Structure formats: structure tokens, C-alpha cells
Image (tube, coloured by chain):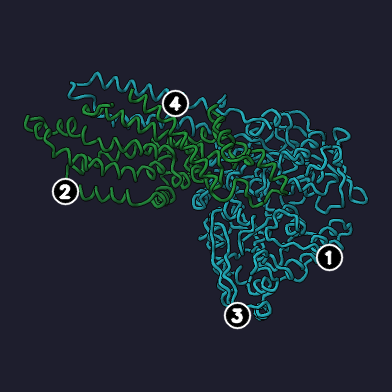
Chain colours: A green, B cyan
Amino acid sequence: MYFLRRILFFVPLLLVISMLSFGLLRLAPGGPFDRERAPASAEIERQLRVRYHLDEPVPVQYVRWLGDALRGDLGLSLKYRNHSVADIILQGLPVSLALGLLGFGFAIGVGVPVGFFTAMRRGGWADWGGSFLVLVGICVPGFVVGPLLVMVFALELRWFPAALWGSPMQAVLPMVALGLYFAGRVARLMREGMAQTLRSDFIRTARAKGLGEPAILMRHAFRLAVMPVVSYSGPMLADLLTGSFVVESIFQIPGIGVFIVDSSRSRDYPLVIGLVLLYAVLLLVLNLAVDLAYGLLDPRVEHE
Amino acid sequence: MPAPTNALGESPGASLFPSVARRGAEVGEQGRKGAGEKGISDLLPPRPPFSLSLLLSFLVAWVLWSATGCSRGPDADLTVLNGPDPGSLDPLLVSGIEELRAVLPLFEGLARPDPVTSQAIPALATRWDISADRRRYTFHLRTNAVWSTGGPITSADVLYSWRRVLEPTNACQYATLLDPVRGATDFLTGKTKDFASVAIRAPDAATFEVELEHPCAWFLDLCAFQTLSVVPRAAIERDGDRWVMMHPPFSGPYELESWRLNDRIRLRRNERHWDAANTPSRVVDLLAVSSPATALNLYLDHRIDVILDKPLIPAELLPEMAKRPDYHTFPMLGSYFVRLNVTRPALADPRVRRALALTVDKRRLVQRLASACEPADHIVPTATTNYLRGPGQTLDPEQARRLMTEAGFPGGKGFPKLVYLCDSSGGGGARLHERVTVELQAAWRQELGIEVEIRQVEKQVYLRAQRTLDYDLSRSSWIGDYNDPDTFLNLFTSVNGNNRTGWKDPRYDALLEAASREPDMARRAVLLRDAETMLVRDAVPVIPLWFEAGFTLHDPARVEGVHGNVLDLHPFNAMRRTAAGRR
């Protein structure tokens, strides 16, 4: 019931999001057909606008777009005029999803153990070293990490290709460049969660009962300590799955991250809205999934 | 216009998704069940799902991977970095140089540009007759011209393709190229709906006739221009806007095998093309790399054989790159100039505009910022044919100061601050515009006491501001479409949509009109020279800074058939990797 209501709430939310982005986009100066070479005559320009219904008032355009969208047609891109918005998303999304999941895997796979062990060795040199590396991971932006990785591992050592997408080797550097920041965030959350949990009463009780340290850590402490990571993983996944402009351009990966920036730059209205909606749906669904995961992980949580 | 078909229909991309989602879900259920069986008690529910989700994410990533990446097939025989993704591969819709270059191998017209000289050479037409008054062209089509799917290409296909360009509802940006054809303008602007009034005929399957309003020096160049290449009628009428992507018949030396945005356009040799025997590379990849640093990395790694545009390598490295033996430059038909908005009160006085031009040291500018280019005192590039050069702009700060005094602004006193508009997008280009502005700022402040500030905006905002005359000074450039002064001088007639300076002069229009009617090439050149003098020396709505140099980055030992030509077109059917270039 709770989830049904949540899902029903998506509908008005998506409507508002689409309406807002539709309206805001038209406010931005410049249009999709402003090119270096202007249309040869005023008449040709008028025909062009008629062809893509840009001559109509914005509310009428919105209703037309909504009608098409409800039938599953997101329209044609105005920049890539042989491609529909759906084509572009279907071509790019799997790539961004694959890269995003790899990045997610990297973030969790590196972040959770690092956080776990730095928490265990609190105050020791391992903690200091680990935390320093985590801080570096968080602070150094992707457009620095990416080129550095390319310089060292592609151009110098020649272990991995410098760019492009296709072979598993080509995914390694982008995965690291994408996941490093998130791995740092995850490690910090994990460390905090673990530190806090280890101080709580039920751990003391477990120790008093004479449970072995591994059982305490893995079965009792970890499950509670990982909660912040779980709640963070929803938005993190949404962030990762919709692609990254920086990483995708550095490694020339044909995902949708580049389009999210480029389409609004080139005033490609239908593509922008298609991508905004995609992002919104992903975010909503993943947040819902996180709430579900809460229920599974923590018996105290009940969905009302 | 046919409505866009539902993209979620039958396309192979669509089927990929549900299957992935399903597979992911199955794994999830199994995983959970397995964990549930192992569960110890209610107090100790399943093992932390993070390891599961980790496994799952790698697994799904792998599935997506195999669906997206590895289906690409073998490496190409030639990999070219042509520029950003074209907006379209439909000859009707293209206008940028990278678009024209990408369309060139796919669709062919009556003529095509020679890879070395870029002059029109026979393509679909094997030869043509020109009447004595040079107004009637009769093209004889080759008998062995066929589409990539088989089936002959006839003069009816040519007729359809030309008509498609002129059809007003198609809103072709380049439609006015056909202005020299008798009746074309009236049909294009909707004055008549009767296509028979346009003097284009296909009397039989192998003959195509065109009648011109006046003799046109560059008409054969037009016949080799990509907008007028031959396209397949049935496929266009069947598939609508997305026809190019639906494996239509192609008329050029290559077929479009696949096109993934932000990745590559893959071309495969059209084995049925009449010249297939002289098309050495079987599979050609056009990469769409947007980051200059990435482009250079790929080139240095031998993943790219040829880079065709300067903004595609990092601007900071240009001076260093220019010393390399694989760095090639050549003159091309391009001008980099400043537009002056003459509708601004401060710039309405031609003496002020002249003063601004007289204080720009173009030689110094080029030496510092664009070393391969040629300083420009004219708008028509030196390499243009049919061109007679007259007096242009000079460097004379002394006279400039006198002119400013005459105009009422001695020492720049009382002169308002000007804003210089330029765009911020596009690789190394934005940096260059910025540095040009700084040089101009310094010169005008020092010599005339005029303050100029820079307004750097997004490309679309810049283009709109320029079109609506919402600027004082604006950086500009223009690449010639055909090899004739007309392609540059025509811009500044009062009716041209690309004028964008607010400057109009009936005498200038009359000179160009007279030139277009003049059958004698020598007399025509004089008329055009007078027009240019009026533009650059007297009225000065523009300050030319330099003529562009074309550029390629390629190692001749590794790849042959890459030539520099004035139109900056590089037909891929002439290029091949050498034995040394093969990996």
C-alpha cells in the first residue's frame, strides 16, 4: 500500500518536472536553429519552425509534447535530426548504465572495506593513511583524476587503452575515474557508521555474552553500520547511472552523460526533457528501492 | 511531413533493455532465495546484501557490456578524426564543414570535388556540354551508376534530389545555392507552386539539363556540392526523418554501416559503386572525439590515422605540434574577421569604423596567435579563383586618430565603451577568441583611447545575439562554399541573412548584381573588386584579421591520399593506410 502510494505520487511529480523544464528551457536565450550559417531566407526559417512546431505558443507545444510522450514518443532531437530522442537514450543509456554499475561496484567494493578497516584501526597509522587517501579521492575532481590515470596507465605504462569503449580493458580507467570519488564518500560513511555502532549498547551486550569478535563485527555491527551507505547508495546510483559528462568526454565513451550537458547547450529541447525525465525516474525509483532495502536490513523500520 | 515513428517499436536497441532487466531480476531473486535458506534466525536475517549487490552490479554491467560494446566487429581500415558528430547525414540538412565531409562519401552528385584540387570532376555525369552563352548545361549520366542496393541511378533521381532542396516545406538551409537556376528562387520563396517553371529537365534517363538565369562561374562547383547530391526517393518517402539510419540505398563510394553518437560513424565501401576499384579502404571509421586532449592521445597511440581540424588538438600544444613533420597546413577559403554593428550610434559613422580598422596590426596578431594563417586586409581569401585584389585595409594609426577627431572623439573622449561579443564553446577556439580580444583591446585603447570589454557567452546565445544585432563588435568567421569571391562578398548584400552587421548599401548590391550578370570573367572580376573595396576600405562593417589555414595531422609514411585543398574537403575514398600504417 505504502509503495503503491509512493508510485502514484510519481505521476504528478513527473508532470511538474516536465512542465518546469519545458518552460525554463524556452526562457534560455538562443534557439536550436541558431547556426553559424543562418537560414537562407526568412521564409525558410519560418518553414523550419513550422516543421518542428516551434511557431506555436509554448503551452500548446507542451500539450502536444505531452500527448506524444504519453504514447511513448519523445520526439526527434533538434540537433541530431536523423535521431529520435528515444534512439539516443537507447543507444547511450546501456553504456552509461554499464559504466555506472562498474563505478558503483568499485565505490562499494573499495569504499566499504576501507571504511570498515580504518574504523577498526582507529587512531593507528592504517587509519591515518587510509583516511588521507579517502580525502584525496573525494577532493581531487574527475577532470584531474581522469587525465592523470591516462597519462600514467595508458601513455606511460601502456597497461590500458587511452580512450574509447568496446573492450573490457577500456573500461578499467573510466571505472576508477568515475568510482574514486564515490569510493571516498562510501569509505567515510562506513567508517563513521562503524565507529558509532561499535560504541553502542548492544555490541557491549554481545561482547558480554562472549561472542567472538568476527561474529560481533560481521553479524551485528556491520549490519547497522552499513545503513548510511545504503541510504547514500540510492542517489549515488542515480548519479552514476545517468553518466558523467567529465569521465565520458575524457575517455570518449558514448554514454548519455555528455548529452545531458550538450543538449541544453545546443537548446535541443526534446532531448533535454527526455533526459531530465529519465534522470527523475531513475532517482525516484532508486530512492524507493533504498527505502525497501531499509525494511530488509533493519527490522525496526516499518513502512506506513 | 511523416510523423516520427515510435522509436520503441522494432529497433534492435529496444529489445536489449527488457532482456537485461529480466536477467537482472532473475539473478536478484535467486540470490535472495539462496541467502534466505542460509539465514540463521530471525535475529540474524540474511547476510549483508552489499556483497550481493556488488556482485549483481558487476554482473549486470557485464551483461550490458556485451550488449553495447563488443558487438562492434573488427577494426577499421582507416580511422579519421573528422570533428564533432554531424547533426545529420542527410545532404538536405548539413551545413558545417564536418557534416559536409561526412556526407561526401555517402552520396554523390553529378560531379564531385577532386581530392587534390577540390575542383569539380565527373561523378554521376561522365561529361557535360555547356552552351556558347554559358547558360545551358547538359549533363550525360554514366550508364554504370547504381545504388548500393542495386538498381540504376537515373536523371529522375537527380531531378528528385534537386527538387527536394528547393521544396519550401523542406526548409533547406542551402537552398539558395540554386539561385542561379532560372525559376528556382520563385519556387523556393513560394511565388509559384509549379515546379515546371524551374528550368531543370530530365529529357531521358541518361540526360539532365539545367538552364541558368545568368552565366554562373561556379555552377560546376555547385554540382559537386553535397547539398545537391543524389538521394533515394523511395527510402525517404518510406522512412521520413530517420531515413538515413534505416539502411537506405547510397549513391556514393561508401555505405553507412552504423552511427553511434559520441562514438563513431562506420562507413563500408559500396562495392557496387562505379569507382569501387579505386576506393582502397574497405571500412572507414569517423570518430567523434570532443576532447582535444583525448584526440591527441588517440593519435599518438596510433588509434587515429588522420586528424582533420585544428580545434581537435589542444590549443596550448599548437606551437609545439607545428614543429612536427606530421603537421600539415595549407591555404583554404576561410576568413576570420570582426563584425561591426553599424546600427549602434557609436559605430554608425564610417569614419569611426575605419579608424578601428586602421589601428589593428594584423601581421603582429597573426604572428602571435595564428602563425600558420595569412594576415588579411580583405575579406576574400588570396587563394580564391576569378579574383582580382584591390586596395584593402591598412595599418595607419595616425590617420585613425585624425578620423576620430573629425568624428568628434579626439583621443577617444566622449566615446562610449564598446562590448566585444564572442563565443565560449569549442575546444581551443574559445581561448583563441579571448586572446584576439585582448590584442584588439590593447590596440584600441593605446591608439584611440577607446575602451572595449569582452562578453564571452555560450555558442547559441552568441549566434542569436549576432543575428538580432544585439552586439557592438563580434568575432566572426566564414568558410567559402565554392571557389569564387561571390561566396564571401554575397554575405554583405542587404538581403543576405548572414550579413548580421546592419550595413546595407544599394550601390554594393548593384555591383554584385551586375557582376552576376556579367559574362566576361575579366570585367566581372573588376566589378567584384570594386565591391570589395567599398566593403573593406570605405564602409568597413567588417575588419578582416586573417585568412584561415587548413590543417591535417597525419604521417604520410603511415597514410596516403590526404591532401590539403582550398575547400578543406578530404574525400575518404582517396585515403589508405600504407603497409607501415597497418597495425
Of circles 1 and 3, which is in front? 3
How crowded pointer 3 is (Cα within 10 Å; few <14, some 14-19, many 20+) is rated as some
Instruction: Tell me which corner region of the image, top left, top right, bottom left or bottom right, holds residue B430.
Output: bottom right
Q: Real-space Cα distance between discs 4 and 1?
A: 69 Å
Image check: A240 left or right of B561?
left
* Label 4 or label 3, whichever comes before in sequence order: 4
* Label 1 or label 3, whichever comes before in sequence order: 3
Of circles 4 and 3, which is in front? 3
Residue B353 percent coordinates (x, y): 67, 70
Do residues under tags 2 and 1 come within 8 Å of each other at their CB atoms? no
Residue in the foreground of this view, choosing between B529 and B363: B529
Q: Real-space Cα distance between discs 2 and 1?
A: 86 Å
Q: Secondary structure at mark 1?
A: helix
Image check: B26 left or right of B46?
right
Of circles 2 and 1, which is in front? 1
The quarter in which the C terminus of chain B is drawn is top right
- Label 3 sits on residue: B411
On residue A124, the disc is 2
Residue B192 percent coordinates (x, y): 83, 40
How crowded pointer 1 is (Cα within 10 Å; few <14, some 14-19, many 20+) is rated as some
For disc 2, the chain is A
- Label 4 sits on residue: B20
Q: Secondary structure at mark 3?
A: helix
